């Protein structure tokens, strides 16, 4: 059994850790509220725009000017893996890397065998994990997460769209965590390019015949690129809110575990202290008996 000094030292150490995890939980909760408000406000607009975009792209599928809906033989693939710049958020980052590797090895195994799958990473932790698993990262844009701004996201989206338009890549996929609530983040694979037709019910299809002004060509040139940039921004907002939710949950569990460990150490300390007192009493009694003899 450890001596009393060692146990006291461990108790103080765990109490300090509990204070840190509790403070981090409160900070993450405050950040989560802000991130949650941002994605809740953005999501209805982005979802409706994506629906319109899907219906529109379906009506323009024979239009050669609509480069973002062109389905080609898949020879080269780009995967955008969105993680975080910071850790202490449970399996948030490792799940992204596992899903990215799974996508490469199972869905695009033939392209991977021919070295035709490239990865762009957003998030320092994901970038480091990909490097550690010997996955080549074409580009990393970790700075985007430092200050999540639509202008920076639009630049990245434009670059990816240009690569798809000039035939550098035939398909672009995004791996990210979709925000459900503070405790639940759903790991998602979402096709960014080419644009998929909208999946709607029969009732929705009745209202999907749009009057296009000034022309289909103008819509293709302006609305579709803008909507793609908004979709990528929505994805990053989802991931940002998911990160804070995952970190808050992880810190909550760490705080609870620290409290349980402190209780166990205090019990061990009391047992050790009682054993020490009993030993001292026995020594005193034994010394007194020896003096009598």
Image (tube, rainbow, N blue to C red):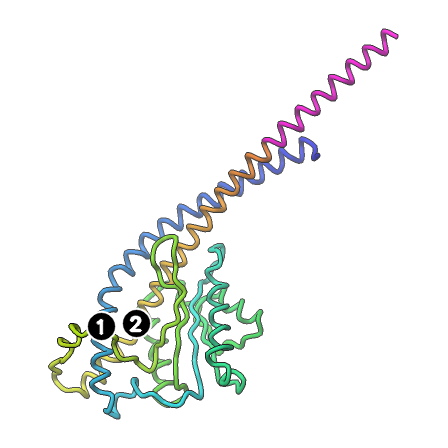
Q: Residues within 10 Å of mark 1 (few under 14, many from 20)?
A: some
Q: Residues within 10 Å of mark 2 (few under 14, many from 20)?
A: many
The alpha-carbon separation of the residues under discs 1 and 2 comes to 9 Å
Q: Residue shown at 50%/81% (left/top)? A: 109
Q: Mark 1 points at which residue?
A: 49
Which mark sits nearer the N-terminus, 1 or 2? 1
Find out whether residue 272 is within the magenta segment: yes
Q: Residue shown at 29%/76% (left/top)? A: 228
Q: 151 and 227: which one is in front?
A: 227
Q: Residue shown at 36%/58% (left/top)? A: 241
Give the vertical position of 6 relative to 57 (above or below): above
Is disc 1 in contact with disc 2, using a CB cutoff of under 8 Å? yes
Find out whether residue 171 is within the magenta segment: no
Q: Name the residue under label 2.
A: 231
Question: Percent from the top left, x then y, of residue 196?
Answer: 30, 79
Where's the C terminus, which quadrant?
top right
Identify the element where label 1 is drawn: helix
Give the vertical position of 33 relative to 139 (above or below): above
Where's the N terminus, which quadrant?
top right
Question: Percent from the top left, x then y, of residue 61?
Answer: 25, 88
């Amino acid at each position: 059994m450890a001596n009393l000094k060692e146990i006291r030292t461990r108790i103080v150490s765990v109490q300090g850790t509990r204070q840190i995890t509790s403070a981090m939980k409160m900070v993450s909760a405050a950040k989560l509220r802000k991130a949650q408000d941002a994605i809740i406000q953005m999501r209805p607009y982005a979802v409706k725009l994506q629906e319109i975009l899907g219906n529109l792209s379906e009506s323009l599928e024979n239009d050669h000017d609509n480069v973002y809906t062109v389905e080609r033989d898949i020879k080269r693939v780009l995967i955008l893996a969105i993680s975080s710049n910071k850790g202490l958020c449970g399996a948030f980052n490792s799940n992204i890397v596992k899903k990215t590797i799974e996508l490469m090895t199972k869905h695009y195994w033939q392209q991977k065998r021919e070295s035709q799958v490239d990865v762009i990473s957003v998030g320092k932790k994901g970038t480091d994990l990909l490097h550690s698993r010997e996955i080549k990262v074409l580009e990393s844009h970790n700075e985007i997460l430092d200050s999540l701004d639509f202008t920076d996201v639009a630049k990245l989206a434009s670059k990816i769209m240009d690569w798809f338009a000039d035939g550098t890549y035939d398909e672009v996929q995004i791996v990210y965590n979709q925000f459900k609530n503070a405790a639940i983040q759903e790991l998602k694979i979402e096709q960014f390019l080419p644009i998929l037709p909208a999946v709607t019910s029969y009732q929705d299809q009745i209202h999907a015949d749009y009057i296009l002004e000034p022309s289909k060509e103008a819509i293709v040139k302006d609305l579709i690129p803008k909507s793609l940039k908004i979709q990528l921004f929505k994805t990053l907002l989802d991931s940002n809110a998911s990160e804070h939710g995952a970190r808050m949950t992880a810190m909550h569990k760490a705080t609870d575990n620290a409290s349980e460990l402190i209780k166990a150490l205090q019990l061990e300390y009391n047992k050790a202290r009682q054993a020490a007192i009993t030993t001292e009493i026995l020594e005193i009694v034994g010394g007194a008996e020896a003096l009598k003899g």
